[in-house]
Amino acid sequence: MSKWWSFGSKQETDSIFRSEVMSLVQMFLQPEAAYDTLAELGEVGCAQFRDMNKGVNAQQRKFIGEVRRCDELERKIRYVTAELEKDGHKVLDLMDDFPPAPKPRDIIELETHLEKTETEIMELAANNINLGTSYLELTEMIQVLERTDQFFSNQESHNFDLNKRGTHRDPEQTNGHLGFVAGVINREREYAFERMLWRISRGNVFVRRAEVDVPLTDPRTGSVLHKSVFVVFFQGDQLQARIRKVCTGFHAHMYPCPSSHSERMDMVKSVRTRLDDLKAIISQTEDHRNCVLNAVGKQLPKWTAMVKKMKAIYHTLNLFNVDLGSKCLIGEAWVPKRELELVETALAAGSATVGSTIPSFINVLDTKKEPPTYYRLNKFTRGFQNLIDAYGISSYREVNPGLYTCITFPFLFAVMFGDMGHGTILFLLGLWMVLDERRLTKKRGGEIWNIFFAGRYIILLMGLFAMYTGFHYNDIFSKSINLFGSHWVNVYNRTTVLTNPTLQLNPSVATRGVYPMGLDPVWQSASNKIIFLNTYKMKLSIIFGVLHMTFGVCLSVENFVFFKKYAYIFLQFVPQVLFLLLMFGYMCFMMFYKWIKYSPTTTVLADSPGCAPSVLIMFIDMVLFKTETASPGCDVNMFPIQREIEMIFFVVAILCIPWILIGKPLYIKWHRRNMPAQPVVEVDEVVEKIEVTGKEVIITEVAEAHESGGHSEEDDEPMSEIWIHQAIHTIEYILSTISHTASYLRLWALSLAHAQLSEVLWTMVLSMGLQMEGYTGAIGLFFIFAVWEFFTIAIMVMMEGLSAFLHTLRLHWVEFMSKFYAGAGYAFQPFSFKELLTVVDED
């Protein structure tokens, strides 16, 4: 079993260093075998098809009818899925065991199943709505009947009946008969409802209302309803008609309500009986609906995968061109050269499935088209490659910086994030995601979680490298560890220190030699700790930056050699690397020379640390041709011929500027004048013909393939454009060399800020708890430690880690990759069922 850290054979390593060699193949498929052949190719997932019908409308393509049928099936599946989720059923996902693509004849059976399922679920949903509506109406009616008892008494009902009878007997003796309307209304509309009734009746109505305390649910939306029961008393038939119109306008439900108390109680009993019967019917309907949904839920993932595969096949078939006789489908696809055999096997399997007597075959074309970029990645390298692809997809066959980013990215991050404690937290987070990745892969999280999980190996290495640099900084939660024992020796006694408290340790007599690795722990209590760390980390950042940029410039040689642009090595690489090394490489050399020459143990005054010149001032003097005045007993130069060498280096660096500016355009002009123009081949030429007959594969060499000359976009450009582009490139490189070197100082700045912030957090929070005494101190330390731990994870690990990550990403994108990386390619997107079915839906 291959491991994530194993890159396998040399070919696989080359596939990471450069993209795969791609071949443009032309496929000739028989119509009856085309569907099965593409089904086999989809399982293999190694061909990216090109659209052969770019000028044809999508509605006019051959298989648009089948695509629409698949769209209708997907609509039905989405409806069934929504019903499952609405009832709380979990929709399972097929992670690995995907069903094969259905046969074309199986689509009728699948349509029948989905049609029957959709119809049954729709009928059940409609019945649920009708039953729910009836249940809601009966519940509201009971509330109206019960609440009216609070509005009427038996005597009031008796008077009401007498008044009503008297009205019919002698209308002139009364002021009109008294009536009322009862019902329910939404609670948010009741105040507007009362105001409208007051206006239309001019105050001649009496309204009583009470809130419904029983929870009501809308059967269509499932939302909770808040309603109130109302009773409106009025006089006159005309006013009654107006009140009913207002109730209708405010969507109030009116229910019949007898005036007699006994009649109301009889009606309540009748309605309750109907409610009990309705509850039993609703329960039986829900049980039946659950059984149907459970049965459908088991088949739904399988149906979803089958429909997606079928739709993808017909969508890909629409990319094929149909000959005039409709006897053959012709298509083109990009295929990795090493996987041509898999394509041949898929063609043979597709023809054998339908028993086709006419063989399918492919032609390998020699083309000038730009192929897609494809890298063979594993779960370890994929995260780092995603960082590169976010900047730009690599051009075809150019050097891939993703291979080196696996080490340089976590290392530069760790230079800014160097702390053994914080690095351990980050390392444990990455280790947990790596060890438990099988379970976490099946977990559906948000977009932020998916980004974190995809970069789990990046987090693991960033934490590991942060522990390494933290060990060299001798920094763990802003404290140092005395691992090798301090090499400083205190030469003073207590009496001397009390009489002269400003004494300092003399390095020439107070040290036992160089500390074995990292920083001496005595620096933790030194008063000039920040000054020393400033100098130390600033020089380290410049050294790492120059090394990183020099490596990027050297990688451009790989591109020049591979694309056979050998002249560009002398015209571009040599002056660029000379300018970088003679200026900033020389400055790094002087840093090392200064560390070696000026020692506290020397007996020569000129070589003592007090006489060591500033490297920055020396570099400025080199550019301005100035000479500083040395201190008494000290020497201005570090070595005898320093000024002469600096002058030579600076002059050669200045000469590199016109070298970069005019070298490449003059070479292109000479090349066009002396080399014969190559005819441009607009039509793809057949190089190899591969015919598949059953299980036999016949390969015929038609023409000799030739390597493309690499990037030749400047061959078609006029000389004026080339001069302008080269001038821009020269200015950009010279200025960026200076600015990029200064940009690497962010390594020093963020490292120092991280260390100081960690020290402040320790001093202001945790040390207060450690200084508390007694039982209250133990309890207080428990809570203070929780606060310190929270701020450590939230600020030092998450916020500072994100900041260091973004700065590291910028150093790779701008300072490193700009030296050699074009990033003008496009990704290889094969026709693959696995990629289609495992894609995460972010909606």
Image (cartoon, rainbow, N blue to C red):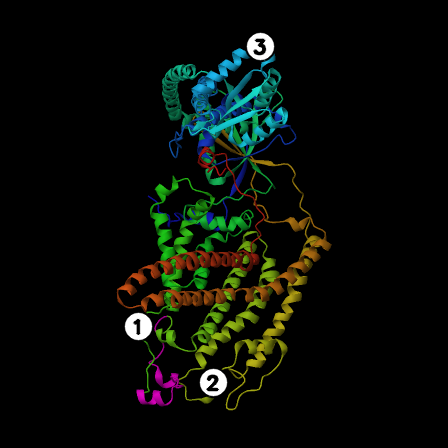
Mark 1 surroundings within 10 Å by alpha-carbon count, few (fewer than 14), some (14 through 19), many (20 or more): few
From what the image shows, is residue 823 above or below residue 490?
above
Mark found first going from the N terminus, 3 or 1 = 3
Residue where numbered disc 2 is placed:
610
The residue lying furthest to the top in this view is 169
Position in image of residue 229 (x %, y %): 48, 26
Mark found first going from the N terminus, 2 or 3 = 3
Magenta range is 493-517
Tell me where residue 134 sits by quadrant.
top left
Which is in the foreground here, disc 2 or disc 3?
A: 3
Magenta-span inclusion, residue 131: no
The residue lying furthest to the front in this view is 173
Residue where numbered disc 3 is placed:
170
Question: Which residue is located at x 42 percent, y 29 percent?
Answer: 215
Tag of residue 484: 1
Position in image of residue 119 (x %, y %): 47, 17
Question: Which residue is located at x 64 percent, y 28 percent?
Answer: 57
Question: Which residue is located at x 54 percent, y 85 percent?
Answer: 636
